[in-house]
Image (tube, coloured by chain):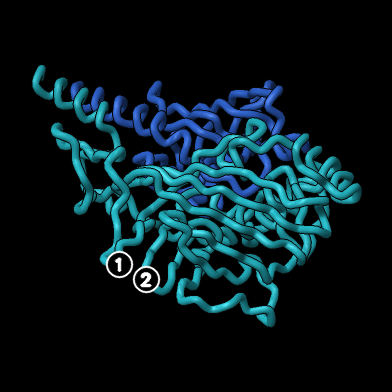
Chain colours: A blue, B cyan
């Protein structure tokens, strides 16, 4: 119980402190629409822990119950590492909820603002910021 | 249980400064003044080398926000004060809409150029000797830059590059770095403020105390601007971390979603 509490507190604190150290190499506004926040929940099918931004791929059920593949762009690996995240913090098969913003080009691409797994907040911060 | 909870709260407050397990990017600073409670004293006087000059060495990160985009060119940049040539203003107005975002060298994982590379993104490590300074930038494939302090003149035959050719000299406690020899491809910031191969940058580095550095910058590019103009950057010391490798082109999936053309 206490250990779990410790873990979640640390993760949230890491996320908050590191929020101003996120790395941007491109314009957020050109790729994503801040006026279109969106939330998805799905099972992780692939993880790319690579520069310049990590990607999570989720199988997300649409209204008809069919799995749709979504790509989620996150922060830079180094920034996440400094927050306390590791490449295996999220694993294939984990069910993750992501709050973020939709891509302007209409593809199933979300820029991650925050992610939770089992009610636990993993980290916050979007790519391109 | 209660003791563990207390430990958890203390650890949470200290955050990355007191991790539960060792992180090589979370290195306790060995040579740093401390306050009576043991914390790094970032307000202590700036250190000096044996030659008496201020020592600018350290891992630094920018403190800039510009038009809602953090870690950008300059905290105090007011576009209305930038003396654009008409063509440069027209290009800037187009770029700031985002329609050319794919053409930003930074989006293509190409170097950001001077002085933008000081401001975005991330941290850089300055290593100072009496004769030269080396700055290593974490972002964009571990870029490095040399600033020669040995009295040499700017090399006018140097091949044009992203970071140019830098020489420096001391003006009291301020290091004045003069850089020319640019390739003309640099976007000065995320908005697309343009530059040409006539760009001449003067950066005045002043370590105001142990943990803070002001960088006053003159942008002198007569092909793009009617007169030189100035901006300021503010950097803060990261006393307890080290640079990490970051190879931008590992997996740059952003380009396919950004508007504009891919140009080289």
In which chain is the residue bearing label 2? B
Q: Residue furthest front?
A: B172
Chain identifier of the residue bearing label 1 in the image: B
Tell me the quarter of the image containing the N terminus of chain A.
top left
Residue B116 visible in the picture: yes
Residue A99 position in % (x across, y down): 56, 26
- Out of B1 and B85, give the one closest to the viewer: B85
Q: CA distance from mark 2 to mark 1?
A: 7 Å
Question: Badge 1: few (under 14), some or many (20 or more) residues near its Cα, within 10 Å?
Answer: few
Q: Residue at x 24, y 26 (%)?
A: A6
Of B61 and B241, which appears nearest the observer? B61
Residue at the (34%, 28%) spot, across then down: A13
Which element type, helix, strand or loop, lies under badge 1? loop
Q: Which residue is mark 2?
A: B130
The answer to whether residue A47 is visible is no
Q: Nearer the viewer, mark 2 or mark 1?
A: 1
B9 to the left or right of B262: left
**SS at mark 2 in the image:** loop
Marker disc for residue B51: 1
Q: Quadrant of residue B50?
A: bottom left
| Image quadrant in which you'd find residue A110 | top right
């Amino acid at each position: 119980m206490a250990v779990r509490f410790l873990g979640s507190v640390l993760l949230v604190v890491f996320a908050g402190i590191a929020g101003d150290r996120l790395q941007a190499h491109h314009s957020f506004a050109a790729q994503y629409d801040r006026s279109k926040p969106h939330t998805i929940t799905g099972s992780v099918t692939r993880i790319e822990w690579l520069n310049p931004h990590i990607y999570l791929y989720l199988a997300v059920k649409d209204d008809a119950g069919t799995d749709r593949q979504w790509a989620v762009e996150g922060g830079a690996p180094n920034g996440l590492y400094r927050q306390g995240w590791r490449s295996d913090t999220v694993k294939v098969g984990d069910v993750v909820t992501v709050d973020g913003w939709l891509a302007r080009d209409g593809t199933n691409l979300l820029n991650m603002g925050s992610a939770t797994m089992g009610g636990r907040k993993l980290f916050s911060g979007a790519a391109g910021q | 249980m209660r003791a563990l909870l207390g430990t958890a709260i203390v650890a949470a407050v200290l955050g990355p400064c007191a991790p539960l397990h060792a992180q090589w990017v979370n290195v306790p600073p060995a040579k740093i003044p401390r306050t009576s409670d043991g914390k790094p004293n970032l307000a202590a006087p700036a250190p000096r080398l044996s030659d008496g000059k201020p020592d600018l060495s350290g891992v630094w990160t920018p403190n800039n926000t510009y038009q809602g985009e953090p870690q950008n060119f300059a905290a105090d940049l007011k576009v209305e004060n930038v003396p654009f040539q008409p063509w440069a203003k027209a290009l800037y107005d187009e770029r700031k809409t985002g329609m050319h975002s794919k053409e930003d060298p930074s989006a293509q994982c190409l170097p950001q150029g001077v002085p933008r590379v000081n401001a975005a993104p991330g941290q850089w490590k300055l290593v100072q000797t009496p004769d030269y300074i080396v700055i290593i930038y974490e972002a964009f494939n571990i870029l490095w830059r040399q600033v020669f302090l040995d009295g040499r003149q700017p090399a006018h035959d140097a091949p044009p590059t992203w970071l140019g050719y830098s020489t420096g000299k001391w003006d009291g406690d301020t290091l004045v770095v003069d850089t020319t020899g640019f390739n003309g491809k640099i976007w000065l910031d995320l908005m697309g403020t343009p530059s040409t191969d006539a760009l001449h940058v003067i950066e005045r580095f002043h370590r105001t105390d142990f943990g803070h550095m002001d960088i006053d910058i003159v942008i002198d590019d007569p092909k793009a601007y009617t007169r030189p103009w100035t901006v300021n950057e503010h950097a803060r010391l990261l006393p307890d971390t080290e640079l990490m490798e970051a190879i931008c082109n590992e997996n740059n999936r952003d380009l396919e979603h950004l508007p504009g053309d891919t140009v080289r």
